[in-house]
């Protein structure tokens, strides 16, 4: 493997484990490329990407090109045999792809062609998938359209959210990539065209975060799970005459919470609430658990929230502070979910 001259491209935290594993495995990493520093916080102080910091710690040469021309110049200087990309954050143009002798492989956190795009883990959860995975594929000019080298399935359990799935897929991905690099070093260049229907996984926008209580409760829970790493799922409530946005940090379905509540097993959908309750109505309050919100088919249990301008808190504490009661309605409208 040391004969392969590799350039690593990555930016966020999730890519750091891949870089560390490659270093442990003795890969010859000629350089590490990440996105430029970005201003963060109230003072808009420039901060290095996590991969840049990790590469410095491992004593690799680091580069942060600001333009396509600078990026191409960096690759020309490094003259890699292979490029390895993990969440770099920008498309690589055809001219740049040609500068690695063998090409570029990319680690993508879904089973391609499903969930092509910037947020595959989030969308798999939002859509209620029970299985996802990791794919190592060869980059081409399209958005996650290149031929596949290898893939590995990763199950999604009912209790999983975006945080746990990022951990699971990253763990599976580091092992998968390590095996692929050994095979490439041995001259094995597998390029299997993607097959099956493609689905998009675009970057999460604010309009995707609105909970829709007029839809199924399961869909609302999936949105909370998928957006657990932010931006969070949210709804609006009128508190002291003012509309306030409430982020939902944790939610569940009554059927999944029966063993932890006093609800009888004969009521798997939760309490019905006052007669004629509309979608978005608070139907019950379970001390130590949360409050129930009516959806189209059953109830949603909201367990932990973060009101606008405040710290995370238990949902019942929020309800008490806001003086909301059974029969009151909270609003929810979700747009842009296909």
Image (cartoon, rainbow, N blue to C red):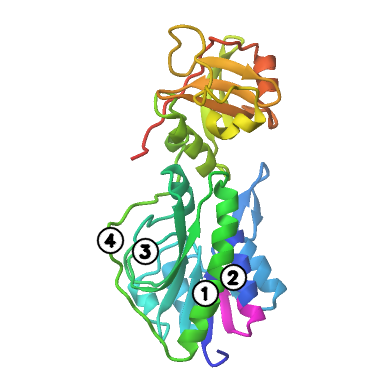
Q: Nearer the viewer, residue 246 or 182?
A: 182
Residue at 54% x, 60% y: name it.
Answer: 169
Residue at 41% x, 44% y: name it.
Answer: 127
Disc with the residue nearer the chain's start (4 vs 2) = 2
Disc with the residue nearer the chain's start (2 vs 1) = 2
Read off the residue under disc 3.
144
From the top left corner, tell me how far across and down residue 5 is, in percent: 53, 87
- Could you tell whether 12 is left or right of 191 in the image? right
* In this rendering, the label closer to the viewer, 4 or 2: 4
Of the 4 image quadrants, the one containing the N terminus is bottom right
Q: Which mark is residue 315?
A: none
Q: Are marks 2 and 1 in contact (CB under 8 Å)?
A: yes
Q: Secondary structure at mark 2?
A: helix
Q: CA distance from mark 4 to mark 3?
A: 14 Å
Q: CA distance from mark 2 to mark 1?
A: 8 Å
Q: CA distance from mark 3 to mark 2?
A: 19 Å
Read off the residue under disc 4.
196
From the top left corner, tell me how far across and down residue 306 is, in percent: 64, 30
Of the 4 image quadrants, the one containing the C terminus is top left
Disc with the residue nearer the chain's start (3 vs 2) = 2
Disc with the residue nearer the chain's start (4 vs 3) = 3
Read off the residue under disc 2.
18
Residue located farthest toward the front when viewing the structure as drawn: 266
* In this rendering, the label closer to the viewer, 1 or 4: 4
- Could you tell whether 10 is left or right of 120 in the image? right
Q: Is residue 44 above or below residue 179?
A: above
Read off the residue under disc 1.
177
From the top left corner, tell me how far across and down residue 113 is, in percent: 34, 61
From the top left corner, tell me how far across and down residue 272 is, in percent: 49, 15
Residue located farthest toward the top when viewing the structure as drawn: 275
């Amino acid at each position: 493997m040391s004969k392969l001259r590799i350039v690593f491209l990555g930016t966020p935290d999730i890519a750091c484990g891949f870089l560390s594993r490659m270093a442990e495995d003795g890969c010859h990493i000629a350089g590490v490329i990440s996105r430029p520093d970005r201003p963060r916080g109230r003072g808009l102080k420039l901060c290095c990407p996590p991969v840049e910091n990790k590469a410095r710690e491992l004593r690799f040469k680091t580069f942060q090109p600001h333009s396509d021309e600078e990026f191409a110049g960096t690759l020309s200087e490094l003259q890699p045999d292979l490029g390895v990309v993990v969440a770099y954050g920008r498309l690589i143009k055809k001219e740049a792809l040609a500068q690695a002798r063998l090409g570029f492989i990319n680690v993508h956190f879904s089973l391609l062609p499903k969930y092509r795009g910037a947020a595959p883990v989030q969308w798999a959860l939002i859509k209620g998938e029970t299985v996802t995975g990791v794919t190592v594929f060869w980059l081409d000019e399209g958005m996650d359209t290149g031929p596949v080298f290898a893939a590995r399935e990763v199950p999604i359990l009912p209790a999983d959210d975006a945080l746990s799935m990022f951990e699971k897929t990253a763990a599976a991905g580091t092992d998968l990539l390590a095996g692929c690099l050994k095979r490439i070093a041995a001259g094995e260049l597998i390029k299997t065209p993607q097959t099956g229907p493609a689905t998009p996984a675009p970057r999460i926008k604010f309009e995707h975060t609105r909970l829709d209580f007029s839809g199924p409760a399961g869909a609302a829970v999936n949105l909370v799970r998928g957006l657990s790493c932010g931006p969070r799922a949210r709804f609006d409530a009128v508190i002291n005459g003012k509309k306030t946005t409430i982020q939902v940090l944790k939610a569940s379905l009554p059927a999944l919470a029966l063993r932890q509540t006093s609800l009888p097993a004969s009521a798997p959908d939760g309490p019905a609430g006052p007669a004629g309750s509309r979608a978005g109505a608070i139907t019950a309050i379970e001390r130590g658990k949360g409050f129930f919100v009516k959806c189209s088919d059953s109830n949603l249990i909201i367990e932990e929230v973060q009101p606008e301008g405040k710290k995370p808190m238990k949902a019942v504490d929020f309800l008490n502070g806001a003086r909301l009661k059974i029969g009151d309605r909270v609003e929810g409208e979700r747009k842009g979910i296909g």
